[in-house]
Amino acid sequence: MASGYSPPQGPGPVAWAHRLTIATAVFGALAYSAWEFATWLHDGGAGPASRAALGVAVAGGFTLYLRHLRARLVEKLTPRRP
């Protein structure tokens, strides 16, 4: 560009919002698991216990994704110079 303006480098605000959304999903899955675990303690049965375990597994998957995302996000979203 002739004016000397160069676009900002780095992942930008979209990357921050994506990380926030994934972190919220992790906490939501853990809260759901705690709720199902409390239901299992109160009522018993295999349903709440299996849903609590599934919630923990989902939270673990989102956590792994978030760790991988943080490691590679800057590399993927930083514009390359010619």
Image (cartoon, rainbow, N blue to C red):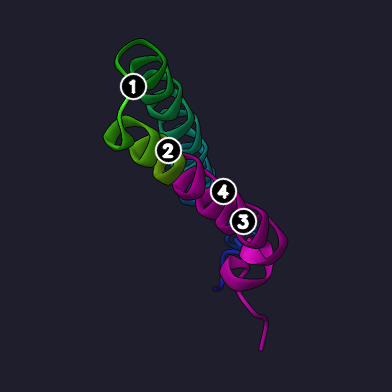
Please give the residue where the numbered disc 2 appears in the rendered image.
25
Q: Amino acid at mark 3?
A: Leu
Q: Are marks 1 and 2 in contact (CB under 8 Å)?
A: no
Q: Nearer the viewer, residue 23 or 2?
A: 23
Q: Which residues are magenta?
A: 56-82
Q: Split into 4 quadrants, where in the image is the C terminus?
A: bottom right
Mark 2 against mark 4, which lies toward the viewer? 4
Residue 79 colored in magenta in the image? yes
Horizontal and vertical percent for residue 3? 57, 64
User: Residue at the bottom extreme?
Assistant: 82
Q: Earlier in the sequence, mark 3 or mark 2?
A: 2
Disc marking residue 44:
1
Dot 3: few (<14), some (14–19), or many (≥20) neighbours within 10 Å? few
Counting residues from the start of the chain, the first of labels 2 and 4 encountered is: 2
Residue 49: say if magenta.
no
Disc 3 or disc 1, which is closer to the eye? 1
Q: Are marks 4 and 3 in contact (CB under 8 Å)?
A: yes
Give me the C-alpha separation between circle 3 and circle 1.
30 Å
Which residue is farthest front?
A: 45
Residue 64: image tag: 3
